[in-house]
Amino acid sequence: MSFISTLEQKLGRFAIPNLITALAGLQALNWVLIKAVPGFMDKLVFVPDEIWGGEWWRLVSYVLLPGSTSLLWLLFIGFIFMLNDGLEEAWGSFRVNLFMLASVVSISAGGLIFGFESTGAVLWAGVLLAFAIYFPNQEVMLYFVIPVKIKWIAWITAAGLVFAFIGDESRRAEIVFSLLPFIAVFVPGWLRDLKHGARVVERRQRYEKAQISEEESMHHCVKCGRTERQNPQLDFRVNADGDDVCHECRAKKSNG
């Protein structure tokens, strides 16, 4: 039994069901407060200097921030409800809780060590990517009009993260630490699959090589070109030059 399964048996009863949905609801509330109260968002962002100065709530409050103050983010908050249902179906409440907790701990620890600020937006990219692994063909209505499969949204999200990582050095640590739980959950399985695939290819190549070897003839008459597979009745001998000669060609030579 895995370590996580053991934890789930002992602590599963403490898991918060629909945690991602609850966080999405708080994000929607904070979206309104950000619009209504000047400077409200600034009090929730993960800022290491402010945390070291005593504002410890920032260690977790950034998770409650919407990734954007635009109206479009409210549409994404509605989309988060679907992510919650899918991941709870795939993992169960305890593992969803553990994934979110690991994400918060990873971002907070990385931010305190490397000094980056965060609004938690990349954390939600990790949640989206995790959902896409299990439900790649799930369709959503983009802008309530265009049906799009989750896998394409995930690929676009992943491409955006790659470009941000390459193009903005100041965001690299945030991206890495935000995605560490996703990497820890899925990358080992991908590596196992790649290793298994390589073994399958190697076994297939060995099998095909063995098949070819079985089809090769041990004897090939240097005179007439016939083999023991084509003509099992032939008797082959090796001549002084080390070549195979069938008994019929040897007889012809003797008679000649």
Image (cartoon, rainbow, N blue to C red):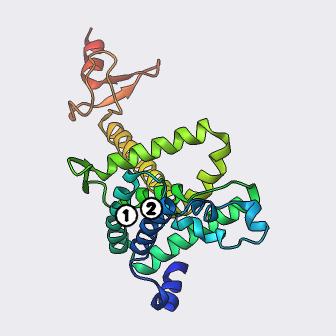
Q: Say which element carries label 1.
A: helix
Residue drawn at x 34%, y 17% is 222
Residue 202 lies, with reference to residue 99, above or below; the image says above
Left or right? Give the position of 1 relative to 142: right
Nearer to me, 23 or 166: 23
Residue type pointed to by label 2: Val
Nearer to me, 120 or 134: 120
Q: Sequence-wise, which precedes: disc 1 or disc 2?
A: 1
Q: Which mark is residue 8?
A: none
Graded by Cα atoms within 10 Å as few (under 14), some (14 to 19) or many (20 or more), the crowding at tag 2 reads many
Residue 9 lies, with reference to residue 197, above or below; the image says below
Q: Say which element carries label 2.
A: helix
In terms of image quadrants, where is residue 51? bottom right
Image position, residue 92 (x, y; %): 39, 78
Can residue 206 be seen here? no
Marks 1 and 2: CB-CB under 8 Å? yes
In terms of image quadrants, where is residue 180? bottom right
Q: CA distance from mark 1 to mark 2?
A: 9 Å
As drawn, the residue found furthest toward the right would be: 53
In terms of image quadrants, where is residue 52? bottom right
Which residue is tagged 1?
80
Residue type pointed to by label 1: Ile
Q: How many numbered dots are placed on residues in this image?
A: 2
Image position, residue 17 (x, y; %): 40, 82
Which residue is tagged 2?
127
Nearer to me, 22 or 210: 22
Image position, residue 94 (x, y; %): 45, 80
Residue drawn at x 52%, y 60% is 123
